[in-house]
Amino acid sequence: MSETHRAIDAVWRIESARLIAGLARMVRDVGLAEDLAQDALVAALQQWPESGVPDNPGAWLMAAARHRAIDLLRKRTLHQRKEGQISQEIEARLQTALPDLDAAIDDPIGDDLLRLMFTACHPVLSTAARTALTLRLLGGLTTGEIARAFLVSESTIAQRIVRAKRTLAEARVPFEVPRGGELAARLSSVLEVIYLVFNEGYSATAGDDWLRPALCEDALRLGRILAELAPHEPEVHGLVALLEIQASRAGARVGPSGEPILLLDQDRARWDHLLIRRGLAALERAEQGGGLGPYGLQAAIAACHARARTAEETDWTRITALYDGLAQLAPSPIVELNRAVAYAMAFGPAAGLEIVDLVKSEPSLKAYHLLPAVRGDLLAKLGRFEEARAEFERAASLTRNARERDLLRNRGITCAQASTPP
Amino acid sequence: MPDAGIVERMTRYNESLTKAGVLLGLDGLHPLSMGARVSFSGGKPKVTDGPFAEAKEVIGGYWMIQVKSKEDAIEWARRAPMPDGDIIEIRQVQEMSDFPPDVQKAAGR
């Protein structure tokens, strides 16, 4: 790839979202807006290698897309009005129908970008479709990049995006920021997409294509953009805080030979303290907005770990209180299991076991190896070795990770030895 | 000290970095004359206070941005409203995963 082509890629990553957003407001169709933006990109790819990258590449792309839009609208009008009937009057209307060019790319408040985010994450679309469309329209990723990051074929993602655009058009989803009662639900749909993208990247392992872990950065970038666009929404800051703090541990959660390192065993000097600081600042903004929501509470829990200089200094009592809040706001068996661990750390294994036993027979946890692993750990701490052994063996049979399986088997064997007095 | 016009343009530029979600941090630095130099030679640190007549290039500040490629960083740097004659140098932050296992082990505690 030539230097200019790489420069064009960079310009595209910086400009495409605002370009598509501005065009979508003009033509009131996200799919068409993206096509127009792509046409402008093609024009840039043809012309810039010769002419060089213009001083204001964003304005150049917008002008190119706008010309194309006028052409298209003219053709449509022609088609509808029969040949030869296009008058100067219509031509003039077409010109004025497209608002001022500078206003379109300036979008100082970012309303268009926010509209685009809400549209791409509209509940009429499946979660997978929202995710692909968001990365494509707002993240500036190519279809190929999205496909590689999500380990699916490029044609699958291409189809998903085409269908999503069609669904939005057919459902006549308005290009606007939802208001009133609708806002909260629609916002949580946007936050969910960003959170999913982050987790997809976070779950990537050492051998994976670098595009997978890069999803964490894409999600963080989208979250930070959203926090600027919707500064009065505490949960947006809560999510950003959570992602910044989780990302701060990226360099510490894998050992030199690729083995996963659990939170309490991590070398805290390897945590990224710039990201922690950003995360704590975002959490503070979330707290200023009133009570914390589910993301804010998870961020507050992550912050307890981030603030502790050593694992021993962790404020487990505060963590139990935050989990109590989370269990009320967003109850789930996984939250309960985590709450149990926090209680065990704060108040001893018996307190934790009491909570674990409440979710022990939860159907959704039936194949979840961490349930017996946690229960086994608490039982062993209480000296109930025979029961603990059975739990560790069960956990070992459920995990798919070989290293973890060995670890759990060994703990089972230790318990078996402890339960039979010499 | 920079004049108000430059500061205003710079503030707008910094805002555009924030709005694009790429800015992690930034700082402007006081002139070198207010700082000091510690040079190392012959195994001994030597301290020199400012001003430094021989300094041709001084670092006036930095941005820390998170972007996908060197080209993205270049594209952002191109847009900075710098006074004539100024230079922006682009450097990538090293990460532990850039190093071989033995170096990573040496960095551990």
Image (cartoon, coloured by chain):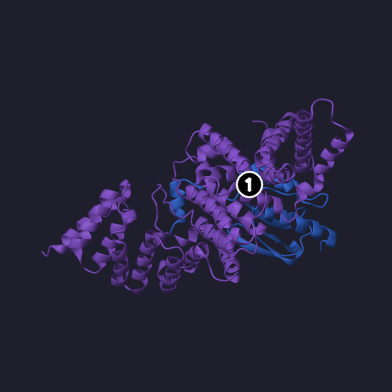
Chain colours: A purple, B blue
The chain ID associated with circle 1 is A
- Res B46 quadrant in image: bottom right
Residue lying furthest right: A88
Asked whether, in this view, residue A325 is left or right of residue A69, the answer is: left
Give the position of the N terminus of chain A as an image quadrant.
top right
Task: State how many labels appear.
Answer: 1
Residue lying furthest top: A83
The percent coordinates of residue A392 (x first, y second) are 25, 56
Task: Specify whether residue B95 is in view.
Answer: no
Secondary element at tag 1: loop
Asked whether, in this view, residue A272 is left or right of residue B90, the answer is: left
Q: Nearer the viewer, residue A104 or B49?
A: A104
Q: Nearer the viewer, residue A175 or A14?
A: A175
Residue lying furthest left: A422
Give the position of the C terminus of chain A as an image quadrant.
bottom left
The percent coordinates of residue B66 (x first, y second) are 62, 51
| Callout 1 amino acid | Val
Q: Which residue is mark 1?
A: A173
The percent coordinates of residue A16 (x first, y second) are 68, 42
The percent coordinates of residue A66 (x first, y second) are 77, 38
- Res A287 quadrant in image: bottom right
Asked whether, in this view, residue B30 is left or right of residue A403, the answer is: right
Crowding around mark 1 (Cα neighbors within 10 Å: few <14, some 14 to 19, many 20+) is some
Task: Specify whether residue A383 is in view.
Answer: yes
